[in-house]
Image (cartoon, helix red, strand yellow):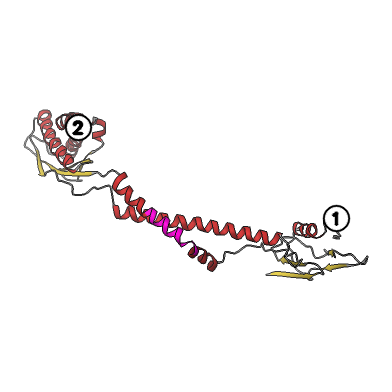
Amino acid sequence: MANTIDFTNKHFHVNIEILNEEKIVQDINLYQLLKFYAKNWIWIVSITLTSLVLGIIFCNFIQTPMYKSEATLLLVRSNSLASGTSQDTVLINNYIELFKSRRVLDPVIEKQKLNIAYDEMAGLVEASNSKSTEVIKVAVSTTDAEKSKSFLEEAVISFKAQVKQLYKLDNVKVVDSASLASKSYNINKGLTILLSTVAGFLFIIIILFFVYDFRISTKSKKTSDEPTDDGELVVENVDVLIQPDDVLRIPEIKNDTPNNAAVVEPKANPSTYTNTLRARDRLFQASYPRERNIRR
């Protein structure tokens, strides 16, 4: 706990806090902070609504929607195919890579008259196998749902033709034909707008907190540095270390008698005193900068 020494002289008042191994910390008044937020409600509402509008604009006009068309293929075992788990796995992996190869996709790009390079198109094509099955799932994603479906249908036809040409087999069957996507898969409008709104709200709350803290700090500094109207000089939040044997002598401004001095002694037997010479100097400079009488 803090020990306080109050000294009232003829012309000024000194309030020195002596702390026992504690540092003076300026607390944030929660009630005053909430009042500050309420006072600036127009900023909070404006920034939050602006973030909401930006989220809507981003979802509808900036972010590019992608539509995915999917199909399912089945590898049918024929008599000419050797039976064996490892051989089946190798064959399926070969089919997956073949589906994404230039040999399959280049004819489709040319037939669809797409203004896109193979490398870019290959990044939009997916092919995978469900474990322990002979099922191959394929998909194509573009910015247009109809185009995705059309491209996937042509890709499946080209793939089957290449399998027949390379392996002399016709063992690829279509289980599910290319689907038509009803909505984009990469945009969640509700979640995006919600996150944008929350981000804007938190942003303005944090900014206003720093503004409030800055104003409180500036106000406290002015209060501690400036004399009051009735001639009192208030020293607040003093960090001066006063040892138990220290004596602080503060002469009056009107030095009528030679021994006219006031003595302030700290309370006896404290274990530790926190001290700052800075506050003592500030006090003397404000009162009579030419006369100092400090004995340690």
Q: Answer left or right for 55 relative to 283.
A: left
| Residue annotated with mark 2 | 114
Helix, strand or loop under label 1: loop
Q: Cβ–Cβ below 8 Å for labels 1 and 2?
A: no
Q: Would you identify the image quadrant in which residue 224 lies? A: bottom right
Which callout, 1 or 2, points at the residue further toward the start of the chain? 2
User: Residue at image x 56%, y 66%?
Assistant: 29
Q: Which mark is residue 92?
A: none
User: In the rendered view, would you say 199 is above or below 21?
Assistant: above
For this rendering, which residue is in front, 144 or 85? Answer: 144
Examine the residues drawn in magenta and state their main secondary structure: helix
Residue interval drawn in magenta: 39-51
- Is 14 colored magenta in this rendering? no
User: In the rendered view, would you say 3 is above or below 205?
Assistant: below
Circle 1: residue type: Arg
| Residue annotated with mark 1 | 290
For this rendering, which residue is in front, 245 or 85? Answer: 245
Q: Is disc 2 surrounded by few (<14), some (14 to 19) or many (20+) residues within 10 Å? A: few
Circle 2: residue type: Leu
Q: Residue 226: x and y, percent?
A: 71, 60
User: Residue at image x 24%, y 30%?
Assistant: 117
Which circle, 1 or 2, is nearer the viewer? 1
User: Residue at image x 51%, y 66%?
Assistant: 35
Q: Which residue lies furthest to the right in this view?
A: 258
Q: Answer left or right for 128 relative to 18.
A: left
**How much space separates mark 1 and mark 2, taking CA atoms?**
89 Å
Helix, strand or loop under label 2: loop
Q: Would you identify the image quadrant in which residue 202 lies? A: bottom left
For this rendering, which residue is in front, 75 or 236? Answer: 236
Q: Residue furthest left?
A: 79
